[in-house]
Image (cartoon, rainbow, N blue to C red):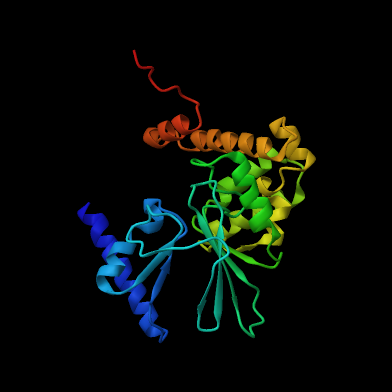
Amino acid sequence: MGWVAHSTTTLSFQLLEIAGREGVSLTTVLTTHHHWDHTRGNAELVHLRPGLAVMGADERISAITRRLAHGEELRFGAIHVRCLLTPGHTTGHMSYFLWEDECLDPPALFSGDALTVAGCGWHLEDTAQQMYQSLAKILGTLPPQTKVFCGHEHTLSNLEFAQKVDPCNNHVQAKLSWAQKRDDDDVPTVPSTLGEEFLYNPFLRVTEDAVREFTGQVAPAQALEVLCRERARFQLALEPSQPQVGALLALQWGLLSTPQKK
């Protein structure tokens, strides 16, 4: 725990140092959801910068000072932020869509675990129907040139699973080859664009024939639910040396039964 606390403090100082070098002041932390790997620095930043606002949609977020609503818009100088409630991975997951006045750069989406490169956060708290709404009806309607900045870089394993789902998809094969080269060169694979995601991300392609055939489902939400379960199974096979991770995933997806009370 001491090492974790030291690491978090170091990263917090580094963040504030970067802000100082850029000539800006850190006033607000926008948090996508309450999981520890997305929030553990919040309290330390508030300690280092009293008055710092911590915003999100879930009261479980560490050090939260203000809850945001779906569709709410914030502004930081010339940068606009539209708050998009995207439940599925968690019930209170918020994604953030950003654009800048008089800027030719494409807009950006900070999607947390709602949408990742070639994948998504396997839904743990909400229903598959709600997750489908978040992916298809909220995020999926954003401009195709939107750059997607996700919370985790699981690109290689996501694309390997996508290849299993849709082995004849040339876009999946090309993206996987690209990602493998990037990984070999220790170069990030994030961001992607939303338009690209519709070409190779099976979680955005649940109405396509290949995904329906793989899942055995026609209804989009049911297909998505099967995809999430199969993605969890796929991850279990990748992590045999981490039994605690495997057991957690298995319990979450009903691959193991919980002890019955007598």
In the displayed orientation, state which residue is furthest to the left. 2
Give the camera-side residue of 17 and 109.
Answer: 109
Residue at 71% across / 40% down in the picture? 220
Give the camera-side residue of 262 and 198.
Answer: 262
Residue at 71% across / 61% down in the picture? 195
Snapshot quadrant of residue 99: bottom right
Residue at 53% across / 36% down in the picture? 232
Total number of numbered discs in the rendering? 0
Give the camera-side residue of 86 and 16.
Answer: 86
Which percent across, then down, holds residue 38? Answer: 41, 57
Snapshot quadrant of residue 39: bottom left
| Rendered-image quadrant of the C terminus | top left
In the displayed orientation, state which residue is furthest to the right. 209
Give the camera-side residue of 185 and 12.
Answer: 12
- Relative to residue 129, is residue 219 drawn left or right? right
In the displayed structure, would residue 99 be above or below residue 85? below
- Relative to residue 65, is residue 212 drawn left or right? right
In the displayed structure, would residue 260 be above or below residue 28? above
Which percent across, then down, holds residue 193? Answer: 66, 63
Which percent across, then down, holds residue 109? Answer: 58, 65
- Relative to residue 35, is residue 81 drawn left or right? right
Which percent across, then down, holds residue 164? Answer: 67, 38
- Relative to residue 131, is residue 242 drawn left or right? left
Residue at 76% across / 46% down in the picture? 169
